Image: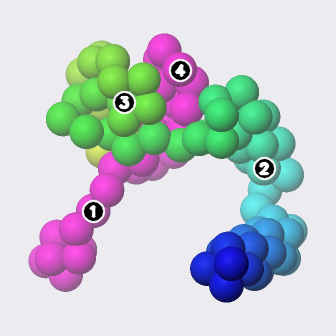
Amino acid sequence: ETHFANLANELADLDRQQTTLSVLVDKPLLVRYNRLKTLRKGYAVAQLREGSCGGCQLQLPPQLVAEVKRGDELMDCSYCHRILYMARHLDEETTE
């Protein structure tokens, strides 16, 4: 029972943090994120993995992959519409 109580407390803390930090996010982006989160069973973002969306597992067009890698703006999966991100490893960031 204490494990569940700890998880409940942790979840409550995360909810409070999300509420506090959400005021710092651009309103249209937050609306978009919340809509996607509702539509996609809690997952609004997906990692780009080897040219595929980590959400729907479908292969993405090369131009979209290049735009996500460039990181100039937020890009959506062409199929499931989740917001795509590119994971960066710590050692890659230190060499840039």
Q: What amino acid is at disc 4? A: Cys
Instruction: List the residue tagged with mark 4.
Output: 80
Q: Nearer the viewer, mark 3 or mark 1?
A: 3
Figure check: 79 above or below 24: above
Q: Do we see residue 23 in this rendering?
A: yes
Q: Position of residue 16 (x, y in %)?
A: 83, 76
Q: Do we see residue 96 in this rendering?
A: no
The one of 8 and 69 positioned closer to us in this rendering = 8
Figure check: 3 above or below 35: below
* Distance from Cα at disc 1 to Cα at disc 4: 23 Å
Instruction: List the residue tagged with mark 3.
Output: 53
Instruction: List the residue tagged with mark 1.
Output: 88
Q: Position of residue 68 (x, y in %)?
A: 37, 40
Please name the residue shown 45% across and 41% down the image: 46
Q: Could you say whether the residue bearing mark 1 is in a helix, strand or loop?
A: loop
Please name the residue shown 64% across and 30% down the image: 40
* Labels 4 & 3 near each other (Cβ < 8 A): yes
Residue 86 in the magenta stretch? The answer is: yes
